Image (cartoon, rainbow, N blue to C red):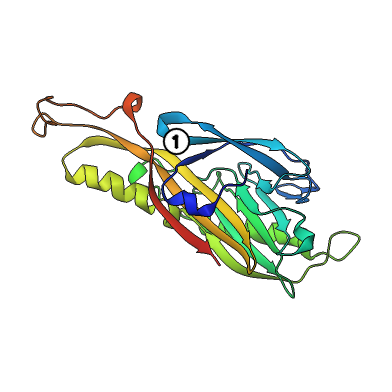
């Protein structure tokens, strides 16, 4: 059953993964046929109170799944509303922690192309969790370069590609979706907690409406820390928050496209 974007505000989803067949591989740019990337989703019990999302490739599935790869950009064309969608109502992609999404519109249509770009080799790692909402030096350009590289296939005329005319109309980066995690960690730092860290992730879901594709994201998780003796929790002196007693909740959920 497709995930409704209205549920992202309150239900933390841990996205599973699968490997649709690759339609075009010009490493590091990989493209998929949306029909071959159709999946069904099964919801279950995830970690720390989250809802798990298990994916299964299915040619009649109501959702299209876009994977990702480190140092790669993956893309897929999504049909607009109407008979061409053939029952597809939902878009999902691999969970995000530092990647960037791009959306291009196919000019003259309601179809869009979604790109999931990762540049782990250029400013991708963040040693300090308080900086997880910052794209490091060189990273924005590296991600833009991956997007441009992926567009080559989609804009190349036949027989090399579909020869589409594209216009970029949306982006989503960690400066937006990781901001709430940093705010939550800062809140604990301000309360005197030490060794503060964040555990969780970001899930992106798109929904096909009569007007076209709408996409939302949610960031979910919890914060671990050491509580100083000077700030006890009730009568339990020095109680810490450790990995073993986390409770994932939605920290933020937003519409990012259109």
User: Measured along the vertical axis of the image, is residue 231 above or below residue 65?
Assistant: above
**Residue 99, can we see it?**
no
Residue 253: where, in percent of width, then height? 43, 54
Task: Tell me if mark 1 has few (under 14), some (14-19) or many (20+) residues whose alpha carbon lies within 10 angstroms of its own.
Answer: many
Q: How many marks?
A: 1
Residue beneath the point at 78% across and 45% down:
36
Residue beneath the point at 32% across and 26% down:
245
Q: In this view, does 218 lie to the left or right of 106?
A: left
Residue 178: where, in percent of width, then height? 41, 50
Residue beneath the point at 35% across and 38% down:
222
Residue sitting nearer the eye, 55 or 99: 55
Residue 254: where, in percent of width, then height? 45, 58
Residue sitting nearer the eye, 126 or 36: 36
The image quadrant of residue 161 is bottom right
The image quadrant of residue 1 is top right
Tag 1 residue: 50
Q: Is residue 182 left or right of residue 106?
A: left
**Residue 101, can we see it?**
yes
**For the C terminus, which image quadrant?**
bottom right
Residue sitting nearer the eye, 142 or 253: 253
């Amino acid at each position: 059953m497709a995930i409704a974007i209205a549920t992202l505000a309150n239900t933390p989803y841990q996205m599973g993964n699968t490997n649709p067949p690759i339609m075009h591989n010009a490493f590091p740019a990989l493209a998929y046929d949306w029909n071959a990337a159709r999946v069904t989703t099964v919801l279950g019990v995830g970690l720390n109170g989250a809802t798990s999302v298990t994916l299964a490739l299915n040619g009649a599935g109501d959702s299209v799944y876009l994977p990702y790869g480190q140092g790669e950009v993956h893309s897929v064309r999504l049909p607009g509303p109407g008979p061409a969608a053939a029952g597809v109502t939902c878009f999902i992609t691999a969970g995000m922690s530092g990647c960037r999404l791009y959306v291009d519109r196919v000019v003259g249509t309601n179809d869009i192309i979604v790109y999931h770009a990762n540049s782990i080799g250029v400013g991708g790692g963040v040693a300090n969790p308080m900086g997880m909402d910052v794209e490091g030096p060189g990273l924005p350009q590296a991600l833009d370069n991956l997007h441009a590289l992926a567009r080559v296939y989609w804009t190349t005329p036949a027989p090399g590609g579909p020869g589409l005319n594209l216009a970029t109309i949306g982006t989503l980066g960690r400066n937006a979706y990781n901001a709430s995690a940093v705010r939550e960690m800062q809140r604990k730092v301000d309360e005197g907690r030490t060794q503060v860290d964040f555990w969780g992730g970001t899930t992106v879901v798109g929904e096909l409406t009569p007007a076209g594709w709408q996409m939302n994201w949610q960031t979910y998780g919890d914060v671990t820390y050491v509580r100083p003796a000077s700030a006890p929790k009730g009568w339990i002196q020095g109680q810490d928050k450790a990995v073993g007693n986390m409770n994932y909740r939605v920290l933020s959920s937003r519409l990012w496209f259109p």
